[in-house]
Image (cartoon, helix red, strand yellow):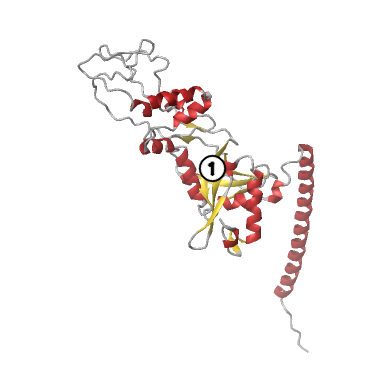
């Protein structure tokens, strides 16, 4: 976006305003800090309402104490019932008695997630009346040679295995397959879904990323994170906390916009991290946080000094009110005493 097209002031979250130069400095500093990770860079646009919208990935660390529940099933795991059909010569199914045989090396199309759907289109159609002719090594039906495919296969032999997998992975993807990949279940620190371990507690401090915009509020970011990992818990059970290096822990309200909090604090997780925690997690103010990193003997001495100061303050208040009590009692006794008149 053209920097000159920005307004002189930028609305940065709830009630905060930045000048154009301050905003551009924050964005340049953020992206420069992550110069080696271009996929994590932030981008910004200006909508029709002249509001600046920032988009990018937000790092969120797991800090929940209670177990979370993963969804038992999702759309990818719900397989429709398929009736038995005649054996397909191109499938890894034994042609004898319609029973599955042992899958041979080279017949597994899902190896390294390689999609060979594009190649199956070029396969010859085997007639039902003519017995299928299989290759001796892989028991695959014989395919007619295509000059274009032959030339392309020669190019594959000149490429590395990683390049070959990357090239063949994206071939022949339909819109439904791409949507299925987009909706697939992510792992939490390597923990994939398993019906036996669908209820577990993520390791404290494990980082994850979620793509959001600066318009999204705290509740919307939590819902986005739970949807990414297919978590069944109610979003109202969680909250986002900003945990600073000093130990200060601040809870973000529902009106706050977490991406702006990240931008204003800078991209470094050493200065501030955003945690997903339980709703009832206690906050830690800056006055208390300054004592958290001290050694235990020093903390004991501080507690001793605070106890002595508290006792002196209690004694001062008690002395003051005892004096006020005696004074009021004396004045009250003077007013209550009977007045004797004398006659001359």
Q: Nearer the viewer, residue 280 or 141?
A: 141
Residue at x 52%, y 33% (from the top left corner): 188
Q: Nearer the viewer, residue 269 or 128?
A: 128
Query: Looking at the picture, does residue 111 appear above or below residue 240?
Result: above
Location of residue 277 (image quadrant): top right
Q: Position of residue 39 (x, y in %)?
A: 56, 41
Q: Is residue 113 visible?
A: yes
Q: Is residue 266 visible?
A: no
Location of residue 278 (image quadrant): top right
Label 1 crowd bin: few (<14), some (14–19), many (20+), radius 10 Å: some
Q: Nearer the viewer, residue 324 or 296?
A: 296
Q: Position of residue 312 (x, y in %)?
A: 79, 53
On the rendered structure, is 71 left or right of 320? left
Quarter holding the C terminus is: bottom right
Q: Position of residue 262 (x, y in %)?
A: 61, 49
Quarter holding the N terminus is: bottom right
Q: Position of residue 247 (x, y in %)?
A: 68, 44
* Outermost residue, top side: 136
On the rendered structure, is 76 left or right of 18? left
Q: Nearer the viewer, residue 178 or 339?
A: 178
Residue at x 47%, y 37% (from the top left corner): 229
On the rendered structure, is 262 left or right of 81? right
* Outermost residue, front side: 147
Disc 1, SS: strand
Q: Which residue is mark 1?
A: 278
Query: Looking at the picture, does residue 59 appear above or below residue 145?
Result: below
């Amino acid at each position: 976006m053209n920097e000159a097209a920005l307004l002189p002031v930028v609305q940065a979250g709830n009630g905060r305003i930045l000048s154009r130069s301050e905003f551009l400095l924050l964005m340049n500093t953020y992206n420069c800090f992550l110069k080696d990770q271009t996929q994590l860079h932030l981008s910004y646009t200006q909508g029709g309402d002249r509001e600046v919208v920032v988009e990018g990935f937000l790092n969120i660390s797991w800090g929940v104490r209670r177990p979370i529940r993963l969804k038992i099933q999702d759309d990818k795991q719900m397989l429709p019932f398929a009736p038995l059909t005649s054996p397909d010569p191109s499938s890894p199914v034994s042609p004898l008695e319609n029973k599955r045989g042992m899958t041979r090396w080279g017949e597994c199309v899902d190896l390294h997630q390689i999609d060979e759907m594009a190649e199956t289109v070029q396969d010859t159609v085997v007639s039902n009346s003519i017995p299928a002719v299989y290759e001796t090594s892989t028991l695959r039906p014989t395919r007619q040679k295509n000059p274009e495919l032959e030339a392309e296969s020669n190019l594959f032999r000149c490429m590395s295995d990683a390049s070959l997998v990357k090239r063949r992975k994206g071939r022949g993807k339909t819109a439904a397959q791409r949507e299925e990949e987009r909706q697939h279940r992510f792992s939490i620190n390597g923990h994939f879904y398993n019906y036996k371990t669908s209820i577990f507690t993520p390791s404290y401090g494990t980082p994850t990323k979620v793509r959001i915009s600066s318009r999204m509020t705290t509740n919307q970011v939590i819902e986005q994170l739970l949807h990414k990992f297919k978590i069944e818990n109610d979003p109202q059970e969680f909250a986002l906390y900003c945990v600073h290096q000093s130990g200060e822990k601040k809870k973000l309200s529902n009106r706050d916009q977490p991406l702006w909090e990240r931008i204003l604090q800078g991209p470094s997780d050493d200065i501030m991290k955003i945690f997903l925690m339980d709703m009832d997690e206690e906050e830690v103010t800056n006055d208390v946080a300054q004592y958290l990193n001290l050694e235990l003997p020093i903390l004991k001495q501080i507690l001793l000094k605070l106890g002595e100061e508290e006792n002196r303050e209690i004694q001062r208040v008690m002395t003051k009110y005892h004096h006020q009590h005696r004074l009021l009692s004396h004045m009250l006794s003077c007013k209550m005493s009977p007045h004797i008149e004398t006659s001359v």
